[in-house]
Amino acid sequence: MTAYDLKEGESARISRVDILGGAGERLCALGFVRGRTVTALGFSLLKSCVLLGCGAVRLAVGRPLAEKIFVERAA
């Protein structure tokens, strides 16, 4: 499942991030790395963007990037 598949307010643990280049480095620098908990805080009107929270960081990412952040729900 991906970060885009989360429902609003739902949290999950990041299992892998399949984003290369500058965007991947930026996510890593902001703390979106394997093992951290990410929360879907909200979606844009047409669900083209999702607001993700990871620790103290809040970041809006588009659907294509959110679909490359793989997460797993806590058991």
Image: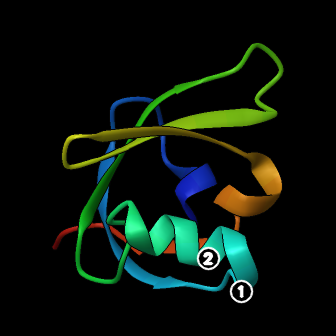
Q: What element carries label 2?
A: helix
* Number of the label disc, if any, that sits on residue 45: none
Give the percent coordinates (x, y) of residue 51. Answer: 52, 33
What quarter of the picture does the N terminus occupy? bottom right
Q: Report if the CB atoms under discs 1 and 2 are less than 8 Å apart.
A: yes
* Number of the label disc, if any, that sits on residue 20: 1
Give the percent coordinates (x, y) of residue 58. Answer: 39, 36
The residue carrying pointer 2 sits among few (fewer than 14), some (14 to 19) or many (20 or more) residues within 10 Å by Cα, namely some
Q: Which colour scheme is used?
A: rainbow
Amino acid at dot 2 = Gly
With 48 as the anchor, is 43 left or right in this view?
Answer: left
Give the percent coordinates (x, y) of residue 24. Answer: 61, 76
From the image, tell me which residue sits under label 2.
24
For the residue pair 69 and 72, the one nearer the viewer reads as 69
Q: What element carries label 1?
A: loop
With 6 as the anchor, is 53 left or right in this view?
Answer: left
- Point 62% across, 51% down: residue: 4
- Point 83% across, 20% down: residue: 46
59 w.r.t. 3: above or below: above
